Amino acid sequence: MSTLINKVLFTRAGYGLTVLRIFVGIIFAAHGAQKLFGAFGGYGLAGTAQYMESIGLAPGYLMATLAGGTEFFGGLALIIGLLARPAALGLTFLSLVAIFSVHISNGLFMANNGYEFALALLGGSIAVLIEGAGKLSADRAIAG
């Protein structure tokens, strides 16, 4: 196996990171489904695009597609542990954009639409980025 592919797929993490990866993946996939499909009470692509435009992230339709796609497909990748590091990298950037473009001015706490939830998801994404997908993952099965 080539060195680059081995570095991407390799994991030294155990079952704890597997649990973290799956739960963070579920949350991201659900948020992406809200943005892309209007699932779980979300506004769908059109509503999300309108919101993105209103906060200065233009063009709104493209930004909504990128954000929703990264959350949905990155979340699915985390759930099954396939290409978890690239998925975690995308979700890390997405979380940083959410924190600094939407939540930072509201303070830490969620009661004021603050950044505490996005910060927790950022931490989970960074943990997967550093440690890999964990013992129960497609990445580990492929890498051997």
Image (cartoon, grey):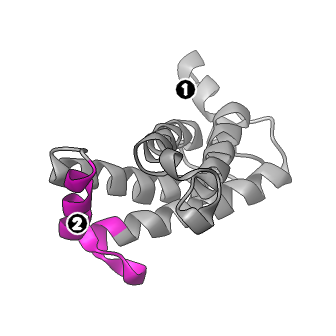
Q: Is residue 136 visible?
A: no
Image-quadrant location for residue 122: top right
Q: Amino acid at mark 1?
A: Ile
Amino acid type, callout 2: Leu
Q: Judge the density around disc 1: few (<14), some (14-19), many (≥20) Cα neighbours within 10 Å.
A: few
Q: Earlier in the sequence, mark 1 or mark 2?
A: 1
Disc 1 to disc 2, C-alpha distance:
34 Å
Residue in view at x 47 percent, y 37 percent: 93
Q: Quadrant of residue 12?
A: top right
Residue 65 or 14: which is nearer the viewer?
A: 65
Q: Residue at x 51, y 57 (%)?
A: 75
- Percent x, y for residue 72? 42, 60
- Residue 117: x and y in percent read 62, 58
In the picture of the structure, the residue carrying the numbered disc 1 is: 5
Figure check: 41 above or below 6: below
- Which span is picked out in magenta? 35-55
Q: How many marks?
A: 2
**Residue 125 painted magenta:** no
- Element under disc 2: helix
Residue assigned mark 2: 45
